[in-house]
Amino acid sequence: MSKEKHHHHEEHKHEEHENVQNAVAQENEKKENAEVQEEKTLSAEEKIAELEKQIDELKKDNADLKDQVLRRAADFDNYRKRAIQEKQEAFDFANTNLLKDLLESLDNFDRTVEAAATATDPKSIADGVTMINKSLISMLENKYNLVAYGVAGDAFDPDIHEAIGSSQDPVASPVLKVVYLKGYKLKDRVIRHAKVMVSMPDGTVNPPSEEKKETEEQK
């Protein structure tokens, strides 16, 4: 065999060897790509499965929270209704103790009215009414701090007295001339102003401060 043919033959064999190696390399690359793709597919499926699990857990948590909110709302609504009912009952029966204490006076008035039908002595009826009045006032003052005020001669105070008339009189400062209706205080709060006639100074009597000043000037 000539050298050229031999060289050509060697080159052909070398090309075939390279072709085989390339084919093997491509096959190996395909296998590797397939394995990588399979791993990616498995990884994606795992991620999807994990996400679905998380979604299910979130749905459950959301359902639990919704249930709690509904229970809380129902509890609050029941509490609100109870509070309204208790407030209404407190308003409706706020005066129960006072009314129970007034029953004794009402009973005594009933007895007095019955006695008046056959009584021959008007004074005994008047004494009975006076006794009931004193007992009632004492109970209201001592137990409920209800205080009556307004007596002729008291200094006029527009904050607690309601003047329904006046006259010019020889007084040094405005005083109560007539008390038509007593005033009442519950503790320190006026719950009814006294209705009064007021004596206003007519200028003939000096206030105590002016009288003292004139006396000092005369000295």
Image (cartoon, rainbow, N blue to C red):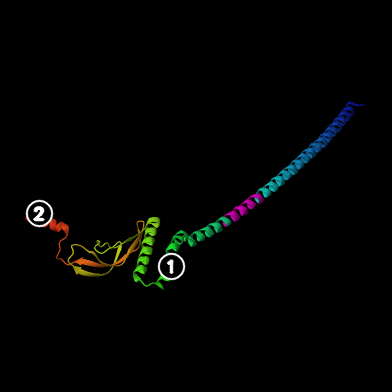
Image coordinates of residue 113 in percent, x first then y, are 41, 70
Closer to the chain start, of discs 1 and 2, is 1
| Distance of label 1 from label 2 (alpha carbons) | 64 Å
Q: Overall secondary structure of the magenta stretch?
A: helix
Residue at image coords 40%, 57% = 144
Image coordinates of residue 60 in percent, x first then y, are 68, 49
Reading the image, the residue beneath label 2 is: 216
Q: Secondary structure at mark 2?
A: helix
Reading the image, the residue beneath label 1 is: 111
Residue sitting nearer the eye, 178 or 191: 178
Q: Tell me, yes or no, whether the highlighted magenta stretch contains residue 64.
A: yes
Residue at image coords 44%, 62% = 104
Residue at image coords 58%, 56% = 78
In the drawing, does residue 183 fall left or right of residue 109?
left
Q: Amino acid at mark 2?
A: Glu
Q: Quadrant of residue 217?
A: bottom left
Residue sitting nearer the eye, 216 or 49: 216
Q: Quadrant of residue 17?
A: top right
Question: What residue range appears in magenta?
Answer: 63-77
Q: Nearer the viewer, mark 1 or mark 2?
A: 1
Which quadrant: the N terminus? top right
Q: Which residue reaches farthest right?
A: 1
Q: Is residue 15 above or below residue 184?
A: above
Q: Tell me, yes or no, whether the highlighted magenta stretch contains residue 8.
A: no
Q: Amino acid at mark 1?
A: Arg
